[in-house]
Image: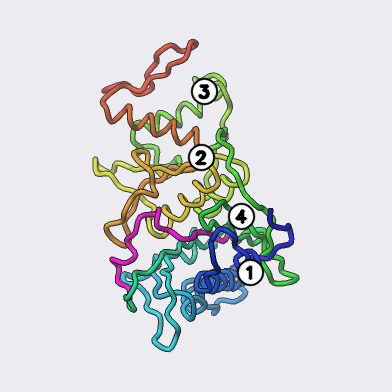
């Protein structure tokens, strides 16, 4: 078990999950943490420094000079190429520089989400196609959260670890080693204002939870919603829970909100490494191969048993069977009647 006062830099240098040191990965992760420190400072100053560089500019500036071959982000339709004057590394970086940015206006937590993929051999200027890899191909993923404290959560494919920025020494320090998500939960996060466009399985699940002890679950549930994926996932990691950003049916056309490459895949990697599950409702998120840079998918992630329950509801619904409560108290009572 790593020591409590282990810094992020020391942690990645001493990474024992790999048979030999990987200087490119170490350099890139150090660049990412440096960028997150700058963004944390800029976010904390808020309106005091209106001319500060954007989070996007900070990520590009701090990460382009070592350890990678190209970057792609939620801003821009093409990858950002590393200047020819910089050394080419072996990795690709995909990121959302400021997840939940509308929250800045009301002083609520925001974050940075990132994913690291291996660059194909012999490709000096990666194209969009080179980033379209399944989530299972990720080498590392993480996110920073800028709230009352600044935290950095990372997985290198062998567990999940959380670091807190110690501003006195200017270093992210290990405070939450080997995070594990409880398999069960009585807390969920969903944007209830979209209930009119939820699919039946999601409506069914939420109705069960809302009915509390009087309903088929026989327990009280708590609902949350921050509209910052980093903040939502951090809460799941710290105390369990379920995060649901489901597929919606707008005029009968299915739509989704979260981008797989920049948001869904890295968070799914983290959650699975912490013992949770991440699904679209109809399949594992990490198995999806994006077909375009900004492809969007529904996301259900968190405590494993609740994710599996929602997957069963989707499966039942897709087979054309009626979703019904199956408990001795309620026998078989459908929440959603035809007509």
Q: What element carries label 3?
A: loop
The residues tagged by marks 2 and 3 sit, at their Cα atoms, a distance apart of 15 Å
| Front-most of residues 322 and 102 | 322
Q: Earlier in the sequence, mark 2 or mark 3?
A: 3
Residue 291 in the image, given as x and y percentages of width and height: 27, 57
Front: mark 2 or 1: 1
The residues tagged by marks 1 and 3 sit, at their Cα atoms, a distance apart of 45 Å
Q: For the C terminus, which image quadrant? A: top left
* Residues shaded magenta: 126-144
**Mark 4 crowd level (few <14, some 14–19, many ≥20, 10 Å Cα):** many
> Does the magenta segment cover residue 142?
yes
Seen as rendered, the residue at the extreme front is 19
- Residue at 49% across, 64% down: 98
The residues tagged by marks 2 and 4 sit, at their Cα atoms, a distance apart of 20 Å
Residue 116, quarter of picture: bottom left
Residue 80 in the image, given as x and y percentages of width and height: 37, 76
Residue 148 in the image, given as x and y percentages of width and height: 67, 58
Answer yes or no: is residue 190 visible.
Answer: no
Dot label at residue 69:
none
**Residue on which the image places disc 2:** 242
Residue 83, quarter of picture: bottom left
Dot label at residue 9:
1
In the displayed structure, 279 sits above or below 25; it is: above
| Front-most of residues 27 and 334 | 27
**Residue on which the image places disc 3:** 217
Q: Earlier in the sequence, mark 2 or mark 1?
A: 1
Q: How many labels does the image show?
A: 4
- Residue at 53% across, 55% down: 230
**Residue on which the image places disc 4:** 161
Badges 4 and 3: C-beta atoms under 8 Å apart?
no
Residue 238 in the image, given as x and y percentages of width and height: 62, 46
């Amino acid at each position: 078990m790593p020591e409590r006062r282990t810094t992020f830099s020391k942690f990645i240098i001493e990474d024992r999950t790999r048979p030999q040191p990987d200087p490119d990965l170490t350099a890139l992760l150090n660049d990412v943490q440096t960028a997150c420190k700058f963004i944390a400072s800029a976010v904390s100053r808020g309106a005091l420094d209106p001319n500060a560089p954007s989070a996007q500019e900070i990520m590009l500036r701090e990460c382009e000079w070592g350890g990678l071959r190209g970057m792609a982000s939620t801003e821009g339709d093409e990858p950002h190429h590393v200047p020819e004057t910089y050394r080419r590394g072996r990795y690709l970086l995909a990121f959302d520089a400021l997840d939940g940015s509308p929250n800045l206006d009301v002083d609520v937590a925001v974050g940075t989400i990132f994913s690291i993929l291996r660059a194909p051999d012999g490709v000096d200027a990666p194209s969009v196609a080179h980033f379209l890899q399944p989530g299972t191909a990720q080498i590392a993923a993480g996110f920073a959260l800028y709230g009352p404290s600044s935290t950095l959560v990372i997985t290198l494919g062998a567990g999940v670890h959380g670091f807190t920025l110690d501003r006195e020494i200017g270093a992210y320090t290990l405070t939450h080693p080997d995070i594990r998500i409880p398999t069960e939960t009585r807390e969920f996060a969903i944007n209830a204002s979209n209930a009119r466009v939820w699919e039946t399985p999601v409506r069914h699940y939420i109705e069960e939870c809302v009915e509390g002890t009087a309903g088929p679950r026989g327990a009280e549930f708590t609902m949350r919603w921050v509209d910052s994926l980093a903040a939502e996932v951090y809460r799941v990691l710290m105390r369990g829970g379920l995060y649901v950003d489901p597929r919606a049916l707008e005029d009968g056309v299915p739509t989704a909100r979260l981008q797989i490459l920049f948001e869904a895949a890295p968070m799914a990697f983290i959650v699975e490494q912490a013992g949770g599950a991440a699904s679209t409702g109809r399949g594992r998120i990490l198995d999806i191969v994006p077909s375009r840079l900004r492809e969007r998918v529904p996301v259900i992630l968190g405590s494993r048993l609740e994710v599996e329950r929602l997957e069963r509801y989707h499966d039942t619904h897709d087979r054309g069977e009626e979703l019904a409560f199956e408990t001795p108290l309620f026998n078989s009572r459908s929440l959603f009647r035809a007509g």
